[in-house]
């Protein structure tokens, strides 16, 4: 089971949607998800996490596609 998780990208300057296993604290791209999105929202005000404005993490998407292909 995988889920999307909003967190800073590897540069720490933008928020992206990572993919991670349900119980994991590490995204599929290897990014450790220690930043809580609540903190990001406090820093930037409301509406930061509108899904349509937040890009997906490319390495995560690539890894996720490979995982899905392996399962089928
Ligand atoms: Zn990622």
Image (spheres, rainbow, N blue to C red):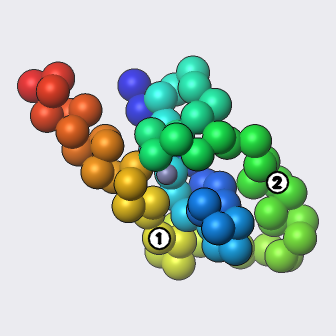
Q: Say which of marks 1 and 2 sits in front.
A: 1
Helix, strand or loop at label 1? It is: loop
The quarter of the picture where the C terminus appears is top left
Residue closest to the eye, 30 or 8: 30
Q: Residue at x 49, y 37 (%)?
A: 20
Q: Residues within 10 Å of mark 2 (few under 14, many from 20)?
A: few
Q: Give the residue at the far right of this rendering.
A: 42
Can you say which quadrant of the picture contains the N terminus? top left
Left or right for 36, reference 65 = right
- Which residue: 23% across, 44% down? 65
On the question of residue 17 being in view, the answer is yes
Name which residue lies at 44% across and 63% down.
56
What x and y, as percent, mark residue 14? 65, 73
Above or below residue 12? Residue 26 is above
Q: Are marks 1 and 2 in contact (CB under 8 Å)?
A: no
Residue 10 lies, in percent from the top left, at 60, 60
Q: On residue 55, which mark appears?
A: 1
Image position of 55 (left or right of 11)? left
The residue carrying mark 2 is 38
Task: Give how far across and how far down residue 67 sits, in percent.
Answer: 25, 32
Secondary element at tag 2: helix
**Mark nearer the N terminus (1 vs 2):** 2
Q: Can residue 49 be seen from the camera position used here?
A: no
Residue located 75% across and 42% down the image = 34
Where residue 4 appears, x then y in whole percent?
49, 46
Q: Using the image, determine if residue 18 lies above or below residue 14.
A: above
Q: Is residue 25 above or below residue 7?
A: above
Q: How many marks?
A: 2
Q: Any mark on residue 34, and which?
A: none
For the residues labelled 1 and 2, the Cα–Cα distance comes to 18 Å
Q: Is residue 70 above or below residue 60?
A: above
């Amino acid at each position: 089971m995988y889920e999307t998780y909003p967190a800073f990208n590897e540069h720490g300057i933008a928020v992206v949607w990572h993919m991670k296993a349900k119980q994991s604290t590490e995204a599929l791209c290897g990014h450790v998800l220690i930043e809580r999105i609540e903190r990001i929202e406090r820093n930037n005000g409301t509406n930061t996490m509108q899904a349509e404005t937040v890009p997906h993490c490319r390495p995560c998407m690539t890894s996720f596609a490979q995982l899905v292909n392996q399962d089928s």
